[in-house]
Amino acid sequence: MLEVTQLTKTYGRGASAVQAVGNLTFRVAPGEFVCIVGQSGCGKTTLLKCLSGLIPPTSGTAVLQGQVIDRPPDKLALVFQEYSRSLLPWMTVRANVTLPLRSKGIDSARREDLAEEALTAVGLSGFFDRYPWQLSGGMQQRVAIARALAYQPEILLMDEPFASVDAQTRADLEDLVLRLRDEFDVTVLFVTHDIDEAIYLSDRVIVLTPPPTRVREVVDVNLPRPRDQIETKGLPAFTRLRAHVFELIKREPAGSAGDEVLSDQHAT
Amino acid sequence: MTTAVGAGPALGADDHGGQRVWWLPWLTVLGVLASLEALSRSGAIPQDHLPAVTTVLTALGAELRNPTFWLRVWETVQAWGLGLAVAVVAGIPLGLAIGSNRLAYRIVRVLIEFVRPIPPVAVLPLAVLLFGTGVEMKVYLVAFAAFFPLLFQALYGVQDVDPVARDTARAYGLGPAGCFVWVTVPSALPYVATGLRLSAAIALIVTIATEIVVGSSGLGYAINEVRYASDIALMYGIILVTGVLGLAIAIVFRQLERRLLHWHASQRQGMAA
């Protein structure tokens, strides 16, 4: 489905260059739910921008279903953390959801159908003609998710989508995404800094090192599905996985990686 | 920051505006008018400097039945409207174009920064030489004055597109044209609306000033006419009319802005921009 090979991204040139993504290699299988975790500033957002074709990688490739990603792929949809900035305030909820479908050349009746289906699926059937700013934060993020689903992607990229909603809403949205993933049969790549969230949602967790970013370890999450906020998080296996991932993130950069960090800092 | 605004209370937030004392500002107006009347009638200020309010209104009332007066009003409104229209048609697209192209902006920046501070009145004699004293000359000057606020507001507006909104549109496959129409232009709209409001006011000032200096038509010329006739009361009356015209323009454009930008944070919270 998605193959990332030796991907690096460096901003700027020469002495002032900042290496945002060191060297990343991983793959996501069809139908998988994969979470990427790492400390803040480890280049997660840069990685997603490369994967969504918004910026070119400095070296290496990302391949989606056999196609090298060199511009925004139409089989890929994106959900940002900043829902209030990612939704357009001058458009109704319905228009926000249908807008991306124009670029796919879908006719207007079909656009309406797709939008209504997606909005109903996220539980916003009564809010088609509201404006995003008339809705709560959680509802706005639901609109953004509906927009992504209506786009009929094969893969859904989510960039810390629930980092700015309250805890209860967050739990609801996590369960919503798990349900929608089955309903719409979509592969999900989910970036978060929340270890509990990563383990609760995913089939596999990719743990990144601090910059220059590499894959520290890929952790398989073999917790039973369907997941449940109380039951799953109460399992001993969940606790073990959480401790393991936590250690991976906290661990000091070992050997050569540490030296690179230091030499980078001296260089700047 | 933006998140906080977007997530704020929205539904029914405008339920309790300050509508209870709508008559309070009008009371002030009435009070001032009454004081002026008293000052004039009592002789505290000589009548030929400040005629009584009632005298002014009587003179103006008589003038309102004069077709020539309405011709003057029309001449002013016409020059104002045409000049503003030229500025809109030239300034907004040019601002949008220059603003969305970094190279274009760098090429013309010095030029427009140099031309902008020239007061329109300084160009007046040139305009008279080129266009005579007719309506073309007025339109030229008004357009010159109204052009720059529109140009700069459109230019700044285009440059202030939220990067997240732009990334979203691009990630969802909207090409440069799609991004421009659906994201860039609406983002710039609040800026353009402010530019329009500023330009409309400036255009009226320049129209009247031109008519006074190179008088051949319009309300500015009417003011000159009553000056030669030493009709102080009517002069106050016509000055009042120019004020009413300015107020009407301000109200129309404010309403237009409210209609067009009902989705914008400044309008949502019922605040003046």
Image (spheres, helix red, strand yellow):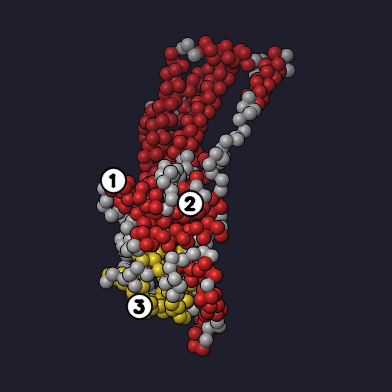
At horizontal 44% and vertical 71% (from top left) the residue drawn is A224
- The vertical placement of A122 against A70, above or below, is above
Q: Which residue is mark 2?
A: A139
Q: Nearer the viewer, residue B271 or A251?
A: A251
Circle 3: element type: strand
* Residue A49 seen by the camera: no
Amino acid type of the residue that numbered disc 2 sits on in the rendered structure:
Met
What's the CA distance linking mark 2 and mark 1? 25 Å
Amino acid type of the residue that numbered disc 1 sits on in the rendered structure:
Ser
Is the residue at mark 2 from the same chain as the one at mark 1?
A: yes
**Callouts 2 and 3 close, C-beta under 8 Å:** no
Q: Nearer the viewer, residue A214 or B84?
A: A214
- The vertical placement of A79 against B187, above or below, is below
Nearest to the eye among marks 2 and 1: give it: 2
Q: Position of residue B189 (x, y in %)?
A: 44, 44
- Disc 2 or 3, which lies upstream in sequence? 3
What's the CA distance linking mark 3 and mark 1? 39 Å
Determine which of the numbered discs, if any, sits on residue A5 in the image. Answer: 3
Q: Chain of mark 1?
A: A
Determine which of the numbered discs, if any, sits on residue A108 in the image. Answer: 1
Circle 2: element type: helix
User: How crowded is the residue under tag 2: few (<14 C-alpha within 10 Å), some, or many (20+)?
Assistant: many
